[in-house]
Image: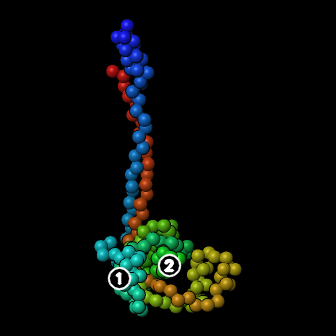
Amino acid sequence: MKKIIFAATTLLLFACSNNEQPEQTTENIEVTITKHGENITEEGALTVAEFLAQFEGKDSLETKLMATIKEVCQKKGCWMMLDLGNDMEMRVTFKDYGFFMPKDGAGRLAYVQGVAKIDTTSVEELKHYLQDAEASQEEIDAVTEPEVNYSFEAVGVILKEEKITTGTESHEGHEH
């Protein structure tokens, strides 16, 4: 009797399993790289922390830096703001107005090569930048003092964007 129950249980297990496998999700990382200005490489680029440490106590520094783009000029792409962390940012302009960034560049990783400086940005220039950024008139009128900050004149820029794409594959089993 035990053998018959065991055989029946085994048959039920095989009959209930339909050999379907669950869908599998695959993730692919798609990397898009664009170069602007001089043909530079990523090699030797400083992190933001390394850059800030090397720049301390200096008026200018010729360097290569990698940082995330916080904002791009929405009129022409003629400047961008890099995120330096701790609520600090650095305006990047392009040597001789020779090239521009895509207006949708915010959030991308940028490798910039050129010269960083400590700069004083005039009230007039700050208001112009706010107009480029399509700020409200109230924000523009609120600017009353020049700003001391980091600036960077880039000779070349590499933009890197990583997109994660996901796909699902269904593997249906076949009964033998």
Residue 48 appears in which quarter of the rendering? bottom left
Q: Residue at x 47, y 72 (%)?
A: 69
Residue 99 appears in which quarter of the rendering? bottom left
Classed neighbour count for the residue bearing mark 1: other residues with Cα under 10 Å, few (<14), some (14–19), many (≥20): some
Q: Amino acid at mark 2?
A: Glu
Task: Say whether residue 128 is left or right of residue 157.
Answer: right
In the picture of the structure, the residue carrying the numbered disc 2 is 89
Instruction: Tell me where residue 11 appears, x and y as whole percent.
Output: 38, 16
Q: Are marks 1 and 2 in contact (CB under 8 Å)?
A: no
Does label 1 or label 2 sit earlier along the sequence?
1
In the picture of the structure, the residue carrying the numbered disc 1 is 63
Question: Could you give the CA–CA distance between mark 1 and mark 2, rounded to whole angstroms?
Answer: 17 Å
Image vertical order of residue 62 relative to residue 38, above or below: below
Residue 121 appears in which quarter of the rendering? bottom right
Q: Is residue 6 visible?
A: yes
Q: Amino acid at mark 1?
A: Thr
Foreground of the two, 110 or 39: 110
Task: Please identify the quadrant where the N terminus is shown.
Answer: top left
- Judging from the image, what secondary structure is the residue with disc 2 in? strand
Q: Residue at x 61, y 90 (%)?
A: 145
Q: Is residue 102 visible?
A: no
Q: Residue furthest right?
A: 138
Task: Please identify the quadrant where the C terminus is shown.
Answer: top left
- Judging from the image, what secondary structure is the residue with disc 1 in? strand
Image vertical order of residue 99 relative to residue 27, above or below: below
Q: Residue at x 40, y 20 (%)?
A: 13
Foreground of the two, 92 or 25: 25
